[in-house]
Amino acid sequence: MAEEEEKESPVKSTAVVKYSAVYSPITYSRLQCNTDLKQPPSNWYSSYGESFGLQHVIAHSSSGFSSFQMAHMFPDCVGEVDVVSDAENIKKLLKIPYSSSPVSMVVHRVENTLLLDEFDLHSHLLNQSESDWEWMRKLFVEHFRQNMSRENMIVRKNATPNQQSLVSKFLHYSLPSEEEMKQQNTKDKETKQTKPLLAAKEWPCLPEPPAEKENPDPSSTRHKFARNVIWTFEDIQMLLGTDLPIFGGGTHPCLSLRLRDMNKPINVLTGIDYWLDNLMCNVPEVAMCYHLEGIVQKYELVKTEDLPDMENSKFSPKLIRDVAQNILSFLKSNATKAGHTYWLFKGKNEEVVKLYDLTSLCSEELVSTSRNPFTIPVAMLLYRVARNMKYSRVCYTSPGTIRMLLKNCLSLLSKQDYPQLVTSCHYMLADLYIPVTMDPARPNLDEKFQPEEDDLVEDKALCRPPPLTETLSERCKAALHHVSEGLQCLQYFPLNKEEEGADESKDSKRSAEPGPKFANPSDPIPMPFRVKKPPDNTDTAPADSAKSLLCKKEEEAMPTWAQVPAATDSKAWKSHLQMLLYKKACLVYAALAESSYDGGRYGDALKYIEAVLDCRTHTGLPYSGALASYLLGRAGDCCFKAVQDWTHVDIHNSALEHKINNLSSSESNGPSMYAKECGLIPKQLTSIKETMLSSLECYECALELASSDASRRNLWPRLGNIYNELGSMFMNEAGLACQKEPLELTQQEIRDLFVKAREFLGKGISAFHLVRDDANLALLHSNMGRLMRLLAHTNLTNEEAEERKHYNQALHHYTTALAVLASRKRNPLIWDTVTWELSTALYNLAVLSQEFAHYSSNRKMVNREDMEREVVDLLQKALKYCDIETASTRQVVYQYRAAIIHHRLASLYHNSCRQLDSSDTKRKLALFHYEKSVRLLTKLENTSDLLRVQLERIALAEFTGERANSTQNKIKALQSALSIANECEVTLKLIVVEKKEEREAKSSSSDPTSSKSAPTPPLNSSANSKSVYSNSSVTNESRDRSSIPLDPASSNESSESKSHNTDSNPEASDSNANPPESDTNNRESLVSLLEQRLQAILKQLTKLCWKNTSSPRLATLGEGYRGAYSKLLKKRVECDLETHLCQVLADLKKL
């Protein structure tokens, strides 16, 4: 039953050839019966058999510490496979249940892989002539010599020379002749003789570990296995080296040859040996050649799966599988410390396998007087594996694992003895924290590392290393630390080849120098357990200027060199590594600069930008105008943003004063090729003006150095921003200076401010025109229009023609801004801003043209009608840009502006009708605009302006009555005036309510116990008509963040001087922003004037009605008008005038 179960569930075994150094499989020659194997074949004395891997058959010479050799050949396998070893060592371990022979092996752990090597105590420790193993020898003498017999510790070879010679001759007989080999297809040769796929082809140009230091026993020769295979035995993966000759031919394409003595049956150990050899090489059968005293008798073919059931050599594959799993679990659970040397030992005829941690057993005195021969080879392997994992494009490895490997390597190497490797380790650690592919403007620090359930390990000793989850600033700090450490190692590079190669002279001086680092027994270094996960090739970071200049693409992530220098060329390696470290420092500082800029730490950002330029100088690379352009552009951004954040300027200056650690080594000091660029970066932010000028200088220099159209297009909008800000600043400064009396600045100084403002705004217009940024172009034209208005108002030249010229230029810029926008749909906010400014300019120009003749477009114009026509045209244009229908935040001020324009037009026609032309056309136009104004003011409930317009309407009606030819027309005109007065009843009631509220507010403010509530302020158009700029002057949203928003406050609050009252404040001229006292007095005078006009109208109507006695109706109306007139005159003292007028007007409505 047991045999049936084993057959039903065979062990799982697959093998994949990683590298083959021989022709395999090869067609074998079947020997004839009675062939004498004692006679050597003709090819036995030649090297012909070496092409087929037969050089190791005579005596399976010890492969030495071949696991280190294989690990260096295939570093991509380290961490992926469970074991790396010679196949013979694995067979010894798996035969333990059936063998009483001693086992002695050394075990090392690199990441999740165990390195197993045979450890011959006799050759390494008991031979007193070798001084290289003094450390091990003393350790064994102290701890093991007393407890173990010499016989149990020595591993003896079983095969006799005669047997080995006979097997060798048999295999040479079985080889095909040289002529047969030449007839084989050359393609078959190329496909069967493979070369190792060394990951070194994909490694960066970083120093190679010294070949003589890769093997713990440099005196031993390198064992070149016939093939290296990845053997998967159940769930165990092993990288093995094997010398098994593999043959084939005919119906048996793959088999192994074995020579057997017919007088000696196959024993269990031999059967296991054959079975494991075939499994490890994926050979399906074995051909056994039987002989008697060297004479060939017969051949027998046996399938690999039948070997465990052969007579006299039966064994259990399941037991061997269990042994493999148990030994692997035992080793992984106990051999957990990197850099430690473990000894796996089983004495002769013993059943217990023991594992000793030799590193922990050694005393401190022993460590200080001699060295562990495995320390340096393990460190070299850690370095190579970490380097392969770091730059492999095939297998994704957790950065935490690579960090652990590199730190373990550093803990074992002395920077004085191995400066190249230590420097490289520091570079790779810095590259782990800040990868060379990371975009400093868009750092993505998310580790794509998710544990898989199938890869979880229950053993607590096999824990994953901590991931790199620090913040960007912490990562940058760690990266800079390793860059600094790497630069410090440069001083230990030998000055010439002789010093680098003088190992013996170094040994004599080591007593005075720090010795190599050993693993501390009390401070174990836990090896990480890495979860395998395929790489994620997605890259979401878009390419931009920062990424293209300071980081590399994924496929270019490895530092390269056109021609790798020799390992002994210390000067070349020193220059190359110095360049790599300073390039890494550039990337780190750039990332810090971008992070500081994003976080509003503009002083830090400026400091880091200068550090990038400084480190770039020390790389030895040629001058990069593109990089300088990018960094100066960002420096300009920092200055610009610092101005907007001026309340925290002390914080920014404090950051600028705090110097960063200088990474420059003493050997790299020299003049900086970026001295000019560094000089443009401010060392202190002294004032807003100086900081903005520094920003401008940085932008202009960046534009000059820009090497591509894309970079220039990126910089032009930012230059446009700073031009706008500087232009607005100088415009505001000039306007404020003009308002002060006496003037603090001379007229020439003020004129210079205007010239600068005009120059910068003009450059801003040109900048935005180049990039076709319509929104910002319109804003700059609007600002230029305001500047022209301010120039017209100040009129420093005292030339009257200049005032109108500046106004015309202002109108030109406003209309150009609207033409650029084309329609309100494109940008409603900017459109409303410009239309309001244009309407204000047209209105004020109309007022000035009406009141001052020199504002006329034609100064020689003497015809009043022509002047009136020009004013009307300007007012009509101003009215055109008042959008009173569209619901917006400006609708109220637009309505008020339109009401005032209608009022002025009506007044103009009214005045013309009185003085020049009494035609009915002008009167009707006046009435039309009065009515429009009344309707708008009624909506706004503006009592003072409404009363004023109504009084002018009454005056027009009275004037019409005066010019009437008949009594009937006069009465009709006066009745029309009376009807307008009746419309004032609603306005008077509003005044009554306002006065009541004012009295209540006044009484509450005088009473300290009453609650304080502010009265509702009157409509103030100037408060609602300020120009509102777009929050962002640059609309493109590139990652370079060159889109720097304009500051609304600095862009909008441009003040204008008051050389003319009509436009001292363009919005205040048509607003109701008077002080409360003056507004109240004005209102009371208007009410009083209404009372007077009402008295005059009633008196005249009474007289006219009484004169016409022929009409009873008029007589009746005359009596009513007389009564109303009488009541109007009899005002009670306790009654307000407004209330009294309301009562009179109510009685008049009854007539």
Image (spheres, rainbow, N blue to C red):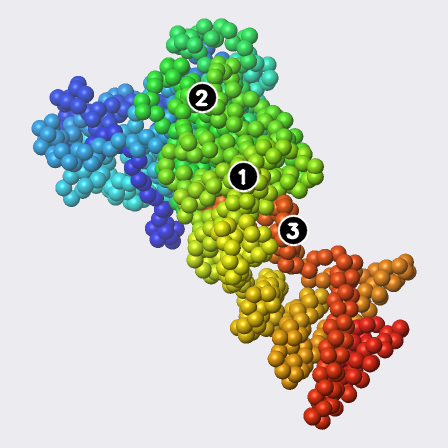
The amino acid pointed to by label 2 is Met
- Residue sitting nearer the eye, 404 or 850: 850
Q: Name the amino acid, label 1.
A: Ala
Within 10 Å of disc 2 (Cα), the crowding (few <14, some 14-19, many 20+) is: some
The local crowd at label 1, few if under 14, some if 14 to 19, many if 20 or more residues have their Cα within 10 Å, is many
Quadrant location of the C terminus?
A: bottom right
Q: Residue at x 46, y 44 (%)?
A: 765
Of 648 and 856, the residue lying toward us = 856
Which of the 4 image quadrants contains residue 502?
A: top left
The crowding category of the residue bearing disc 3, from other C-alpha atoms within 10 Å (few below 14, some 14 to 19, many at least 20), is few
The image position of residue 77, as x and y in percent, is 38, 35
Compared across the picture, whether 581 is left or right of 184 comes to: right
Tell me, for residue 673, which label it has, or none. 2
Determine whether the residue tagged by mark 2 lies in a helix, strand or loop.
loop
User: Distance between the Cα atoms at labels 3 and 2?
Assistant: 58 Å
Secondary element at tag 3: helix
- Under circle 1, the secondary element is helix
Residue 22 in the image, given as x and y percentages of width and height: 23, 30
Task: Look at label 3 and name its amino acid.
Answer: Asn
Picture quadrant where residue 388 is located? top left
Instruction: Please indicate, yes or no, whether residue 751 appears anywhere in the rendered image.
Output: yes
Q: Which mark is residue 757?
A: 1
From the image, state whether disc 2 or disc 1 is nearer to you.
1
> What is the number of the mark on residue 1061?
3
Position of residue 402 measured from the top left corner of the image (x, y, whole percent): 48, 34
Where 1112 sits versus 892, above or below?
below
